[in-house]
Image (cartoon, rainbow, N blue to C red):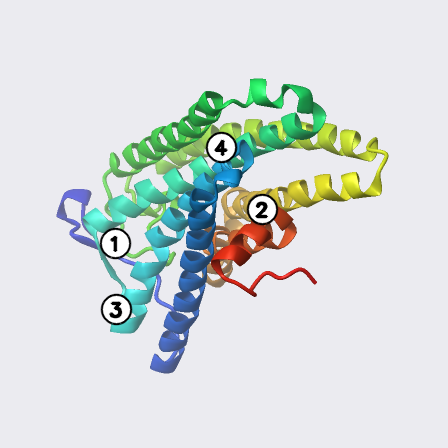
Amino acid sequence: MANSSSITHFLLLPFPGTRQLQLLHFCLFLAIYLAALLGNGLIITTIAWHHHLHTPMYFFLLNLALLDLGCISTTVPKSMANSLRDTRDISYAGCVAQVFLFPFFISAEYFLLTTMSYDRYVAICRPLHYETLLGSRVCLHLAAAAWVCGVLYALLCTANTFSLPLCQGNALEQFFCEAPQILKLSCSTSYLRELWLLVVGACLYFVCFVFIVVSYVEIFRAVLRIPSQQGRHKAFATCLPHLAVVSLVTSTGMFAYLKPSSVSFAFLDVVVSVLYSVVPPAVNPLIYSLRNQELKAALSQLIPGCFQKQ
């Protein structure tokens, strides 16, 4: 038994198996991490380099790529290092940093995805007012609001988690430090705090989710009224990637945090956490680049021959 003042490190969930399986986990995470770095780095470079991409949609996409890089860099490198060194330790300060940074990047990304749905709504449903409603200053304010809201929610999570005394050991059932796992180590009635934190987060995400759903209902109604098939195809091409990303983040996040405790299995929890913390940053660049002809054309100028039209 130990209290929080005597804990100097935490023990992350090890990936069980032989040394060969641990190295396989290292190689798999390394491949995913490099793919995320390459994909998001290309999107950031392409948007920053090409002036014709300096529009609200690509400005928000650039911010999304930055958040994806931060999100995957918070969890994956430490997990890879532990597998390579055959250890499961993480320092107390490192754990606090993960508990703060992961909710920050995830929540800021969801707020940004909500903003991106508003951008698509204005572009398709109110195109004549696009420049007025989404000027450069408005875009900066919306992006800044997403980042600031992420910081505030992360501060709330971190302060709420580490203000409780921890007396049930230091072993976590996750491959990175996450607030619900830390609260399980508390010796007080932490379920009230966990419930309060869950309710606050659920309310924020529910408001964003409703806004996204309403936006896309209006978008699809407007798209179906477009007379030309080419116009409908272009509108869907800019909306479907965003909708796919929102669906992936929402479904895996809801399953991870809203599932009953009786359904909690270590392997299942790890798989779900990988789906909402590791997979989206790696596949987001692929989803957006494959469906966006303008972005593919800009990328082909940076990497000739890689995105040629079929």
Spatial separation of the CA atoms under disc 2 and disc 1: 34 Å
- Pointer 1 residue: 170
What is the secondary structure assignment of the residue under circle 2? helix
- Pointer 2 residue: 245
Q: Is residue 24 above or below residue 163?
A: below
Spatial separation of the CA atoms under disc 3 and disc 2: 33 Å
Q: Position of residue 227 (x, y in %)?
A: 86, 34
Of callouts 4 and 2, the N-terminal one: 4
| Location of residue 27 by image quarter | bottom left
Q: Depth check: give the residue in front, 182 or 244.
A: 244
Q: Identify which amino acid the numbered label 3 is placed on.
A: Thr
Q: Depth check: give the residue in front, 102 or 173.
A: 102
Q: Depth check: give the residue in front, 74 or 48.
A: 48
Q: Is residue 176 visible?
A: no
Q: Identify which amino acid the numbered label 2 is placed on.
A: Val
Residue 87 circle label? 3
> Counting other residues with Cα less than 10 Å from the Cα at mark 4, is it few (<14), some (14-19), or many (20 or more)?
many
Query: Which marked residue is nearer to the observer: mark 2 or mark 1?
Result: 2
